[in-house]
Structures are given as structure tokens and as C-alpha cells.
Image (cartoon, grey):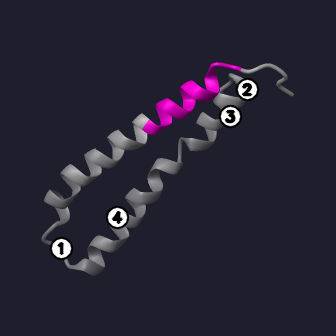
Amino acid sequence: MRTEPTWRIPAGVIGLTIAIAIYCVVVARYVPELIGGWHALLQTPVYIVLGLVWLLPLRRFLIWMETGRWG
């Protein structure tokens, strides 16, 4: 158990916020051009997947913030 503050937590929160913002801008900028002409029922699963895909690296990132290890 950690007893002292670590720089990884604030750096991780800032890094995560920046990474999510960049991901959102990229998705909002480029995805509508690719699937904008599709029917709404076909667009919906694409946006659901893109809305959840950022969660994939989150577990390892949170582990790093707490322990300093990636796994």
C-alpha cells in the first residue's frame, strides 16, 4: 500500500484528460466524413464502439498511476 503521494496520479489525470480530448476531437472530426451518409441505424453501433474503445487501455493506465507498473 502506498503511504506517500506520488507524481503519477496528477500526471496521469492530466495525461488522461488530454488523451481523451484528442481522441474526441479526432472522432468528431473524421468519423462523420466517413459514415455521415449511412443510415442512422448503421451509424449507431459505430458511435457506440467508438464511445467505448477508449476504455480498453484505461485499466493498465490506472494500474500505472497507482503502482508505477503497466501490468
Q: Amino acid at mark 3?
A: Ile
Q: Which mark is residue 47?
A: 4
Task: Please tell me which residue is depicted at 41% across the width and 66% down the height of the picture.
Answer: 48
Please provide the residue range marked out in magenta: 6-17
14 in the magenta segment: yes
Count residues near mark 3 (Cα–Cα under 10 Å), then give few for <14, some for 14-19, many for 20+: few
Q: Is residue 14 in view from this perspective?
A: yes
Tell me which numbered mark, 2 or 4, is placed earlier along the sequence. Answer: 4
Q: Position of residue 41 (x, y in %)?
A: 29, 80
Task: Please tell me which residue is depicted at 62% across the width and 42% down the height of the picture.
Answer: 59
Q: Amino acid at mark 2?
A: Thr
Tell me which numbered mark, 1 or 4, is placed earlier along the sequence. Answer: 1
7 in the magenta segment: yes
Question: Would you name the residue on which mark 2 appears?
Answer: 67
10 on left or right of 66: left
The Cα–Cα distance between marks 3 and 1, rounded to whole angstroms, is: 39 Å
Q: Amino acid at mark 4?
A: Tyr
The Cα–Cα distance between marks 3 and 2, rounded to whole angstroms, is: 6 Å
66 on left or right of 33: right
Q: Position of residue 58 (x, y in %)?
A: 57, 43
Question: Would you name the residue on which mark 3 appears?
Answer: 63
